[in-house]
Image (cartoon, helix red, strand yellow):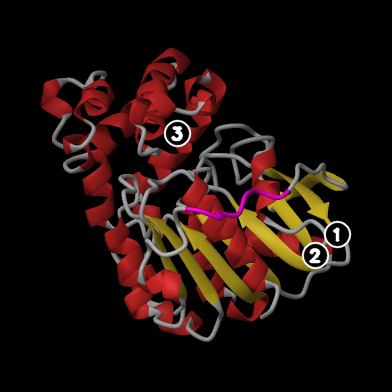
Amino acid sequence: MDRASQNPSVGQSHGRRGLYPEIDPYNFGWLKTDGPHEIFFEECGNPGGVPAVVLHGGPGGAINPTMRRFFDPQKYRVALFDQRGCGKSRPNASLDDNTTWTLIEDIERLREHLGIEKWVVFGGSWGSTLALAYAITHPERVMGLVLRGIFLVTQRELKWFYQDGAGMLFPDAFEKFKAPIPEAERGDLIAAYHRRLTDPDRRVQGVAAAAWSQWEGDTISIRGPEARPPKFNETDFAIAFARIENHFFANRGFFEEDGWLLKNVPAIRHIPGWIVQGRFDVVTPLETAYALHKAWPETKFEIVWDAGHASTEPGIIDGLIRATDAALRV
């Protein structure tokens, strides 16, 4: 562990690294699956570079141009894709055959399609969940793991953010989150939202999706609701994001037991890993990242003292850029 990892205040207040320059994809397309889904993917950077795959958050989020910029474009061959039901993947907002395990199948399908033997796996928030699940399932395909905003889909984490915890820090935003749900149903907000987000009436879905998505958008930055990204206000994005995210959380991530990821960390301890975590992350609190590092002490673990959950906060960008640079040397 380096000095900055032991003392997060060291090297964090000045001289921070920024994103690499904007780049365009040199390849993109849709990949057919065994079911109804077609997965949109793109490649950017150096076609002869070190392969990496980006796993976006949510589940139900989507890739965006900023995600390309966490990698040195001269040295990395970066693959990005929209997970089932979201972004440019088709059909939009579909919950059919949409589980953690079918997403892992898609990662492998994409790897084989691109002719890649092993790659660096990069993921934040739900992307860290999926990255860990993929690495545990296919450790031989992973050169390194670069993770941010660690989330293990445990009952404790879900209760913190969607029921009783984060609302104490963001009571104004949490009041709006609870507003569409009658008092009698507020004992299990994930279940209450699940009923509405799977309602056949798109208008019912829309009201619930807006509140669900805006709650997350209001809490990802230490600046709070004023920093909500505009995409969380877009109806089409919100419906896909909320439906898929809630679907996964109502099913506890489709893991066979609570804490499954942490229990299976021994399977990946030989893989080089980097963890970048905001000290004031309310969406995926530091406790989880700390537990992962204790179970996997070989990781380079960095706590960013002045950051929340968002990948675009300056300290998070700095930590991730240094991590992807370091991953080139494994």
Identity, as a three-letter code, of the amino acid under mark 2:
Lys
Residue depicted at x 88% and y 61%: 47
Q: Which residue of the protein is positioned furthest toward the top in this rendering?
A: 203
The secondary element bearing badge 3 is classed as helix
Give percent across and percent down for residue 272.
56, 79
Percent coordinates x, y for residue 146 in the rendering: 56, 65
- The reply to whether callout 1 and callout 2 are in contact (CB within 8 Å) is yes
Residue that label 2 marks: 75
- Residue at label 1? 46
Residue type at the position of mark 1: Asn
The residue lying toward the viewer, choosing from 234 and 95, is 234
Residue 6: give its label: none
Residue located beneath label 3 in the image: 243
Q: Is residue 99 visible?
A: no
Q: Earlier in the sequence, mark 1 or mark 2?
A: 1
Q: Marks 2 and 3, how far apart in space?
A: 37 Å
Percent of width and height locating residue 117? 76, 75
The reply, left or right, for residue 26 in relation to residue 85 is right
Query: What are the residue bounds of the magenta stretch?
Result: 14-20
Q: Nearer the viewer, mark 2 or mark 3?
A: 2
Q: Residue at x 63, y 75 (%)?
A: 142
Quote the CA–CA distance across marks 1 and 2.
6 Å
